[in-house]
Amino acid sequence: MTKIAVLGAGSWGTAFSLVLADAGADIAMWARREEVAATINERRENSAYLPGIELPPSLRATSEAEEALAGADVVVLGVPSQSLRANLEDWAPSIPSSAVLVSLMKGVELGTTKRMSEVISEVTGAGPERVAVLSGPNLAKEIARREPAASVVACADEDVARKLQALCHTKAFRPYTSVDVVGCEIGGAYKNVVGLAVGMAVGLGFGDNTTASVITRGLAETARLAMAQGANPLTLMGLAGLGDLVATCSSPLSRNRTFGEKLGRGMSTDEIYASTSQVAEGAKSCSSILDLASRNGVDAPIAENVDAVVSGRCTPQEMMEAFIARDTKAETD
Ligand SMILES: NC(=O)C1=CN([C@@H]2O[C@H](COP(=O)(O)OP(=O)(O)OC[C@H]3O[C@@H](n4cnc5c(N)ncnc54)[C@H](OP(=O)(O)O)[C@@H]3O)[C@@H](O)[C@H]2O)C=CC1
Ligand SMILES: O=C(CO)COP(=O)(O)O
């Protein structure tokens, strides 16, 4: 049986572990806090992140990463994007040299503008044939309730993507394969920023014309950056592009959309951070996505405006006005 280590016992690390368990794998999860590991093992529940969801006995947890990693064939990484590098530096010596590393994260590293797969390769030395990405419209709570959904497993080595696909295909979860790691990662990181913009529009009280306009222009912006990085444009029309964008921008379960909605209703970024421990990756990654766009000579007006609101340089109302006032000759539909 394939041995899988899932590092990160938050909502997505736990929900995806459940998918892997349903598909028949043996899973060792790493939780940062000992009490989270204990609750998973003793009560078969991760009450901090997925209350009321029963976890199967094939899923064990530990707060010792070394223990979770021992003998792992596949290592799934599910921590916040901005903490990946520091965590991986600690874990790298314990990662088996032939293990395939799978990123669940949707963000771009601050400072370096690196995608998560690039951080993984850089820290662990793993080549592209050992680094994969899972991305798609996969809100953790719905996946944990086993509501039907599809996703994409991307790896430069198609055979590896196919093996991972087999490891997570269940009655409720349908993974597709791709070799376009860049397209999947840019799609996953950018949709968080667009989710923030859509949330702001909703918080301001605007309706479906506004949100559809922001979603569509957000997709154009995402595709421009992804293509400049070498992605296949068709990836952005698929599950890791449009699919994830639709889920994030339409669901009250999305933390990015919720964060944007609170901004739209007049809360400041600091007030939102003080009111919740939930991570909105888009708010953290926005400035690095902008840096990446500028390094690639790509126009990123939505990311620019979202960054200005998140950092307190303009209001959501001004952001929407800038969206409409922008020189239309600068872009075609
Ligand atoms: N939730 C979702 O629906 C989906 C999320 N994703 C992506 O998955 C990634 C993880 O998100 P998600 O599971 O939702 O996040 P959560 O906020 O639900 O959980 C975060 C997890 O990371 C741990 N953590 C927090 N800070 C650190 C740190 N500095 N070092 C190590 N561990 C840390 C938390 O531990 P502790 O409890 O101790 O704080 C917790 O286990 C994100 O990039 C997100 O975009 C992708 C698809 C779906
Ligand atoms: O990535 C997600 C759904 O695919 C989760 O979105 P949020 O991080 O906005 O909750």
Image (cartoon, rainbow, N blue to C red):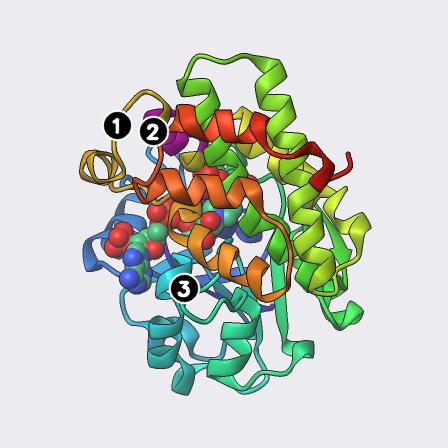
Judging by the rendered image, the residue that carries numbered circle 1 is: 267
Q: Residues within 10 Å of mark 1 (few under 14, many from 20)?
A: few
**Residues under numbered marks 1 and 2 in contact, where contact means CB atoms less than 8 Å apart:** yes
Judging by the rendered image, the residue that carries numbered circle 3 is: 110
Residue visible at 59% across and 14% down?
A: 208
- Alpha carbons under labels 3 and 2: distance apart: 22 Å
- Alpha carbons under labels 1 and 3: distance apart: 24 Å
Q: Reading the chain from its start, which is encountered first: label 3 or label 2?
A: 3
Judging by the rendered image, the residue that carries numbered circle 2 is: 263
Q: Is mark 2 within 8 Å of ligand 2?
A: no
Left or right, residue 38 beside residue 102: left
* Position in image of residue 3 (x %, y %): 54, 69
Residue visible at 62% across and 31% down?
A: 215
The residue closer to the viewer here, 143 or 186, is 186
| Element class at badge 2 | helix
What residue range appears in magenta?
257-262
- Amino acid found under the numbered disc labelled 2: Leu
Q: Residues within 10 Å of mark 3 (few under 14, many from 20)?
A: some
- Amino acid found under the numbered disc labelled 1: Met
| Element class at badge 1 | loop
Query: Image height check: is 65 above or below 172?
Result: below
